[in-house]
Image (spheres, rainbow, N blue to C red):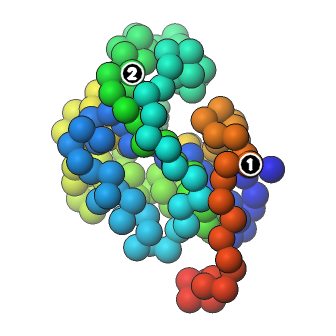
Amino acid sequence: QSTCTGVNERTFLAIKPDGVQRHLIGEIIRHFEKKGFKLVGMKLMQASEDLLKEHYIALCDRPFYSHLVEYMRSGPIAAMVWQGLDVVKMARTMIGETNPADSRPGTIRGDFCIEVSKNVIHGSDSIESARREISLWFHTDKLTCWAESTEHWIY
Ligand code: RTP
């Protein structure tokens, strides 16, 4: 099962091509690690057009859809799965609003980008989306299991 509940809840995060080219991978990973979440899967990859169209299928009627797919194809993406209590919702809060101009300082989009068309990072918007996106981007058997011995320092 790709998304569990409680402390085993999982979300899909992707550092978009602008975030990779601007050397923000380490900073973004550090942000989620410091929060207490666990990185359970990661790969740097050039996503195919088919994968990106499927990933953003819900936006296929939007005027920016083809531009969005081109942007996401313009360089490597750091695709990741993160785990922890309420990670889907909390990661979205940490990322900020879709438009960086509406994102508060302290959030990733609030601190690291300016335009909606180059907003550095994606995060699943619901448990259902997380489940769909994790299985789209990762083989579940490639995701890591952590020892639980450190949990009591976080929860
Ligand atoms: P994401 O899926 O990338 O995490 O972003 P989101 O949920 O915050 O926003 P969503 O509405 O799903 O939009 C997906 C991505 O499309 C680009 N976008 N461009 N007006 C525009 O030009 C426009 N609106 C959205 C952004 O890259 C957004 O993250």
In the figure, residue 74 lies in which quadrant? top left
Q: 147 above or below 23?
A: below
Which residue is labeled 2 in the image?
A: 73
Q: Position of residue 85 (x, y in %)?
A: 63, 68
Q: Position of residue 144 (x, y in %)?
A: 65, 59
Q: Look at label 2 and name its amino acid.
A: Arg
Q: Quadrant of the C terminus?
A: bottom right
Which residue is labeled 1 in the image?
A: 141
The front one of 48 and 28 is 48
User: Horizontally, is 3 left or right of 88 in the view?
Assistant: right
Q: 29 above or below 57?
A: below
Q: Secondary structure at mark 2?
A: helix
Judge whether residue 119 can be spotted in this image. no
Q: Secondary structure at mark 1?
A: helix
Q: Look at label 1 and name its amino acid.
A: Asp
The front one of 55 and 59 is 55
Write down which quadrant ligand 1 falls in: top left
Judge whether residue 7 can be spotted in this image. yes
